[in-house]
Image (cartoon, rainbow, N blue to C red):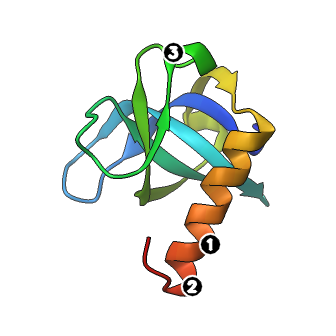
Amino acid sequence: MPKTGDVIIARVQFVDSEGSKVRPALVLFEELGNIIIAGITTNMQMKGIHISTKEGAAQDSIIKLNYIFTITNEAILKTVFHLSPEKKHLVFDELSKRLSGFKT
């Protein structure tokens, strides 16, 4: 089972298209077989939280907290690396602000 803070490669089903796409994502949490993830992009113009190659990313990337999906364990192809405790704290602080309506 994936752990909170794992950066994974997974098959993600998009609402606006048929089929799935293989994408990097951050595991936010898992509960009862449902895995909640945030999408990751290498488009550095996007808003989100930066992760670097020094942290384990294949390329400098952005965790997109406005791009949340639910997947199952079967959709996970591999785990790439695990975020540091400091970066996880930053992610969840930002997510909490967004969910509570605070502007960032």
- Residues at marks 1 and 3, CA–CA distance in whole angstroms: 26 Å
Q: Which mark is residue 41?
A: none
Which amino acid type is shown beneath numbered disc 1?
A: Ser
The 10 Å Cα crowd at callout 2, few under 14, some 14 to 19, many 20 or more, is: few
Q: Which of the two residues, 59 or 75, is positioned nearer the viewer here?
A: 59
Q: Which of the two residues, 5 or 84, is positioned nearer the viewer here?
A: 84
| Quadrant in which residue 62 is drawn | top left
SS for tag 3?
helix
Query: Label 1 belongs to which residue?
Result: 96
- Residues at marks 2 and 3, CA–CA distance in whole angstroms: 31 Å
Left or right side of 81 for 19: left
The 10 Å Cα crowd at callout 1, few under 14, some 14 to 19, many 20 or more, is: few
Which numbered disc, 2 or 3, marks the residue that appears first in the sequence?
Answer: 3
Tell me what residue is drawn at x 51 percent, y 15 percent: 53
Left or right side of 52 for 41: left
Query: Label 3 belongs to which residue?
Result: 53
Tell me what residue is drawn at x 50 percent, y 83 percent: 102
SS for tag 1?
helix
Query: Label 2 belongs to which residue?
Result: 100
Which amino acid type is shown beneath numbered disc 3?
A: Thr
Which amino acid type is shown beneath numbered disc 2?
A: Ser
| Quadrant in which residue 11 is drawn | top left
Quarter of the image where the C terminus is located: bottom left
Left or right side of 56 for 20: left
Tell me what residue is drawn at x 73 percent, y 52 percent: 89
Which numbered disc, 1 or 3, marks the residue that appears first in the sequence?
Answer: 3
Quarter of the image where the N terminus is located: top right
Q: Are marks 1 and 2 in contact (CB under 8 Å)?
A: yes
Q: Is residue 34 visible?
A: no
For the image, the number of numbered tags is 3
